[in-house]
Image (cartoon, helix red, strand yellow):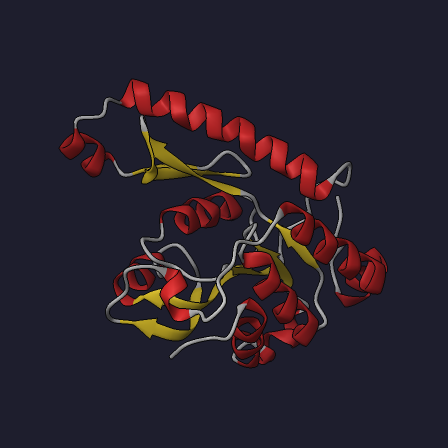
Amino acid sequence: MRFRDRTDAGRQLAALLTGYAAESPLVLGLPRGGIPVANEVARALGAPLDVWVVRKVGAPGQPELGLGAVAEGGALFLDREMMRSLGFSETEVMQTAEREAREVAARIARFRGVRPAPVLEGRTVILVDDGVATGGTVRAALRALRTRRPRRIILAVPVGAVESLDALSAEADEVVCVHPAEFMSSVGEFYDDFRQTTDEEVQAVLARMRREQGPESAMNAGDAWWV
């Protein structure tokens, strides 16, 4: 299965999530690529949309090699087995993690501005990304979300590696995926158009949804949206 782009993927994913509309869920997208997908889900469910920021922790000197992730809310996931096998010490990897934590804070300010984080306690939260390969960043996001005491967390992605989705099922209350892939080298191979989503595009999507729905829509749907 292939998706035309993230919008197409989001619409197909939304079709699997319509049953959650009655729970007045909050949809959170992982920026940047998860936001166009989450936008379609939020629209289909009539739900508010926000970001949940996560950053990969790359290997020292090899930033593309992911050794873990740090998420909004302070959750840190490190693949210590991989660190040991590659000879990276906890100290040097933590230096990278601290740098990425500062970038998480910067991106929160960039995407959310002065608005506070959404209230998660007691709510159904649908966490959306454009796909899951190894699952490290998503795992950090799920762990951070869990500390906010939501009623339940649904991980929703258009495509994901079966092995990673199985592992993440221990972190989420439910995993919804359009296309669980037995063999997967990258998320992008399942998209015809997988161009990088920009910060400006993320900001535009969030601003448009706020104009269209506003905090009042979430208040009418159930618990307060904003702190």
In the rendered image, the vertical position of residue 70 relative to residue 211, given as above or below:
above
Q: Quadrant of the C terminus?
A: top right
Instruction: Work out whether residue 206 or residue 114 is closer to the camera in this orientation and state it.
Output: 206
Residue 211 x %, y % = 84, 59
The N terminus - image quarter? bottom left
Q: Position of residue 46 (x, y in %)?
A: 72, 72
| Residue 71 placement, left or right of 136 | right
* Image height of 135 relative to 115, above or below: below
Quarter location, residue 39: bottom right
Q: Residue 124 at what x, y percent from top left?
A: 59, 62
Tell me which residue sits at (67%, 76%) in the image: 44
Snapshot quadrant of residue 103? top right
Q: Residue at x 66, y 67 (%)?
A: 42
Of all residues, the one furthest to the left in this rendering is 85
Horizontal arrangement in the rendering, residue 47 relative to residue 145 (left or right) = right
Residue at 63%, 70% in the rendered image:
40
Q: How many marks?
A: 0
In the depicted view, which residue is nearer to us: 118 or 114? 114
Residue at 28% from the left image edge and 23% from the top image edge: 90
Q: Position of residue 96 (x, y in %)?
A: 39, 25
